[in-house]
Image: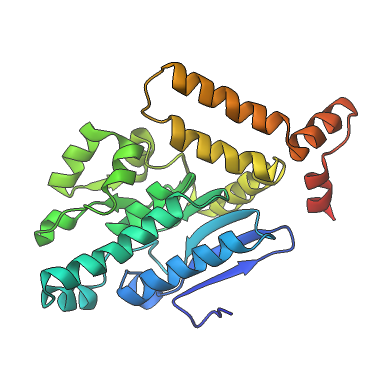
Amino acid sequence: MTTETDTVFSEIDPRGVARLVLNRPERHNAFDDALILALTEELLALEQNPAVRVVVLEARGKSFSAGADLEWMRRMASYGWEENFRDSQALATLMQTLNQLDRPTLARVHGPALGGGVGLAACCDIAIASEEVYFALSEVKLGLIPAVISPYVIAAIGARAAQRYFITAERISAAEALRLGLVHEVVAGDALDTRIESLVDTLLANGPQAMREAKKLVRHVNNQAFDAALIDETARRIADRRASEEAREGLAAFLEKRRPAWQVKNAE
């Protein structure tokens, strides 16, 4: 059971909305080995909890995440190659876990996001930022590279833009992050919670299993050749959905002009 004294904690409301909170405000929610492990474990626990419908990733304090913690980096500098590899694998596992979580994920980016913090935003299905925030892939300033987060950042902004920002470490404004595709929307700071809540309501209105399968579909289809195998696979996936209990309920509710069962349950 997590509490608000932990570096990471979650709260699940009666609708099944989990608020997953980075809680190191005094360190600007910077990553160290303990936070990486705690966040990974919390994500896995939420995925295994059948009551969870949506996950909102947010943070306490002024920053969303300042990337790597300086004390942690100082320790890593004394590690040998094998220790560094194991340590990096833990961060890679965190990013993969968030990216492949089967529930819809929203990043609430209220403050600066640097390094791994950019990775967290890129791994979420939907990222909403307040207009005053900035992002930076600042690793090269320290003689490092954003290797572990690179698959997710490149998927979000494209190779050409990544090439620029990986080597310049320039600050990326919220407006530029929107243009690049790193975030989906930028809103005024005082409108951030309202917009997140609106998106949560939108997601709760949809079939839970259908959204999970839709996420899998994107991962499977992305960057594949448009060949007979892919066409057959997409046909198989929609056939599976059509035959599902959830889809039958959704269609029946539409035809009968009533709310589907998952919306009724959410309203109770």
- Residue at 86% x, 25% y: name it: 255
Coordinates of residue 235 in the picture (x, y in percent): 58, 22
Coordinates of residue 264 in the picture (x, y in percent): 84, 47
Residue 60 in sight here: no
- Residue at 26% x, 54% y: name it: 148
Image position of 73 with respect to 145: above or below? below
> Image check: 28 left or right of 201?
left
Coordinates of residue 201 in the picture (x, y in percent): 68, 46
**Residue nearest the observer in this picture, 188 or 100:** 100
Coordinates of residue 193 in the picture (x, y in percent): 58, 54
Residue that extends furthest to the right in the rendered view of this protein: 256
> Image check: 134 left or right of 254?
left
Image position of 122 with respect to 74: above or below? above
Residue that extends furthest to the left in the rendered view of this protein: 143
Choose top left, top right, bottom left or bottom right for residue 254. top right
Residue 81 in sight here: yes
Quadrant where the C terminus is found in the figure: bottom right
> Image check: 46 left or right of 173?
right
**Residue nearest the observer in this picture, 232 or 176:** 232
> Image check: 62 left or right of 260?
left
* Structure colour scheme: rainbow
- Residue at 19% x, 55% y: name it: 138
